[in-house]
């Protein structure tokens, strides 16, 4: 069954068409238009790791489109604690639902689930691997701000080693010809194999430890949280915990249209003083998760998004 496990599952044309459909669905996400395109469909939310935005925006997307959601709920109160395998859980949820959103601490778990499932699996994060549905909302946010995805200067900063959002996003951005700069502490550099893949595909990527020095040329600065839960050793985390912080006073030389993004949750890496600057875009970015996931679920379920949604839906 087709699903979305990594960004390699989508062509550039499919990405653009998904973003166009997401844009059409904005009035539905805002609650201004009722358009039950997914009436009668059930989404299974299988989150084996903590989640706020991803789980809630999937749920909001399905419900706003007239569908319903069943949740695994807290892993601690599910049969996972009795020792049920992922394979068995998937076999069962497969029968209850029409599509599954899944997050798991193990890299490769979403692909494993997809191989045995009859319904489409959407990878909502597999360990330090990939997070392609986040990339769709990130691309939507970038295109909304800059009108294009092509040729932008994008700085990805923070924990590039364990951060799955930046793994998926860097692949997508370079496919659209963005100039990507990786800014991270030495110990949290983007994995060699990802850099090699990007270069093999013809992308030009730069690496630096100096985030502040990148600000004046950037069109997008994408901050990430240091992924504490993925550090094998607490001391290693403590050494880098406070390494990258953006404060409003750092932004004096930024381009007027530069946007600051973050998949959230933020811990210390963006000071609240940034929130009231024209550059802050992270809360809109989180809202865009609803349209991006609506568009994706329609596509995976073979449901067409009408060209003129206003004439098809019911104004609320
Ligand atoms: C991210 C994740 O889970 O990878 N969160 C999200 O989905 N918005 C980022 C993070 O946890 O730091």
Image (tube, rainbow, N blue to C red):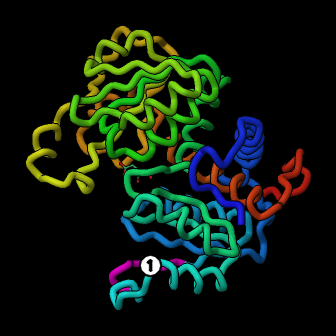
The answer to whether residue 13 is above or below residue 152 is: below
The verdict on residue 72 being magenta is yes
Q: Secondary structure at mark 1?
A: loop
In this view, the residue in front, 167 or 282, is 167
Q: Residue 134, can we see it?
A: yes
Q: Nearer the viewer, residue 316 or 4?
A: 4
Q: Residue at x 85, y 50 (%)?
A: 309
- Direction from residue 119 to residue 236 in the image, left or right: left
To which quarter of the image does residue 35 belong? bottom right
Q: Quadrant of the C terminus?
A: bottom right
Question: Quadrant of the rendered structure where residue 20 is?
Answer: top right
Using the rendered image of the protein, determine whether residue 279 is visible from the camera's viewpoint: no
- Residue for point 40% across, 18% down: 206
Q: Quadrant of the N terminus?
A: bottom right
Query: Would you say residue 296 sits in the magenta stretch?
Result: no
Q: Is residue 58 left or right of residue 278?
A: right
What residue is disc 1 on?
Answer: 73
Q: Which residues are magenta?
A: 71-77
């Amino acid at each position: 069954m087709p699903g979305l496990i990594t960004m390699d599952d989508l062509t550039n044309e499919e990405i653009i068409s998904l973003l166009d459909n997401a844009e059409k669905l904005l009035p539905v996400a805002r609650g201004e238009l009722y358009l039950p395109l997914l009436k009668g469909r059930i989404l299974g939310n299988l989150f084996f790791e903590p989640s706020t935005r991803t789980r809630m925006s999937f749920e909001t997307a399905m419900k706003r489109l007239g569908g319903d959601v069943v949740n695994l709920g807290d892993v601690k109160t599910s049969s996972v604690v009795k020792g049920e395998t992922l394979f068995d859980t998937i076999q069962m949820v497969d029968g209850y639902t029409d599509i599954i959103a899944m997050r798991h601490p193990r890299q490769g778990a979403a692909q494993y689930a997809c191989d045995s499932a009859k319904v489409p699996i959407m990878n909502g994060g597999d360990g330090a691997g990939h997070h392609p549905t986040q990339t769709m909302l990130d691309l939507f946010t970038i295109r909304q701000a800059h009108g294009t995805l092509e040729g932008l200067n994008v700085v990805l900063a923070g924990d590039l080693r364990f951060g799955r959002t930046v793994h998926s996003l860097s692949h997508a951005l370079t496919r659209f010809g963005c100039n990507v700069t990786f800014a991270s502490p030495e110990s949290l550099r983007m994995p060699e194999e990802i850099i090699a893949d990007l270069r093999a595909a013809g992308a030009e990527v730069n690496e630096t430890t100096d985030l502040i020095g990148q600000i004046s040329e950037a069109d997008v600065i994408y901050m990430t949280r240091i992924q504490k839960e993925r550090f094998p050793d607490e001391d290693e985390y403590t050494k880098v915990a406070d390494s990258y912080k953006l404060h409003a006073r750092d932004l004096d030389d930024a381009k007027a249209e530069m946007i600051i993004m973050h998949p959230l949750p933020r811990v210390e890496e963006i000071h609240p003083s940034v929130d009231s600057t024209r550059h802050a875009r992270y809360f809109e970015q989180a809202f865009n998760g609803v349209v991006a996931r609506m568009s994706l679920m329609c596509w995976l379920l073979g449901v067409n998004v009408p060209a003129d949604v206003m004439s098809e839906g019911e104004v609320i």
